[in-house]
Amino acid sequence: MKKMYINESTDPSPITTSLPLKIAIYVGIAGTLLLGIYPGPFIDWAVDATLMFSNIASPTASLPILPGG
């Protein structure tokens, strides 16, 4: 049974990528670092976006208040 990464590569040439792919990779890396280092504004934005929908449900959709509590 042959296992991965045991033998040397048969083609040692570097992998070539197009400019749009490189840009997409770098934007993804930058976004990941930004969210990891400074997540506060993005979390606030997500909370604000969900609160926008909190007034859609009518009062009849909520649970009834039971007597005594």
Image: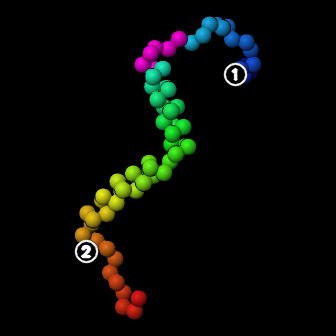
Which span of residues is magenta-colored?
Answer: 16-21
Please tell me whether residue 18 is drawn above or below residue 53 in the rendered image.
above
Numbered disc in front, either 1 or 2? 2
User: Disc 1 and disc 2: Cα gap in Å?
Assistant: 60 Å
Magenta-span inclusion, residue 19: yes
* Secondary element type, mark 2: helix
Which residue is label 1 attached to?
4
Q: Residue at x 51, y 39 (%)?
A: 34
3 vs 37: above or below:
above
Residue at which label 2 appears? 60
The residue at the point 50 percent across, 26 percent down is 26
- Label 1 CA crowd tier, 10 Å (few <14, some 14–19, many 20+): few
Q: Is residue 39 left or right of residue 11?
A: left
Q: Is residue 28 magenta?
A: no
In this view, the residue in front, 29 or 9, is 29
**What's the residue type where badge 1 is placed?**
Met
- Residue 49: quarter of image: bottom left
On the image, the x and y values in percent for residue 61 come to: 28, 71
Q: Which image quarter holds the N terminus?
A: top right
Q: Secondary structure at mark 1?
A: loop
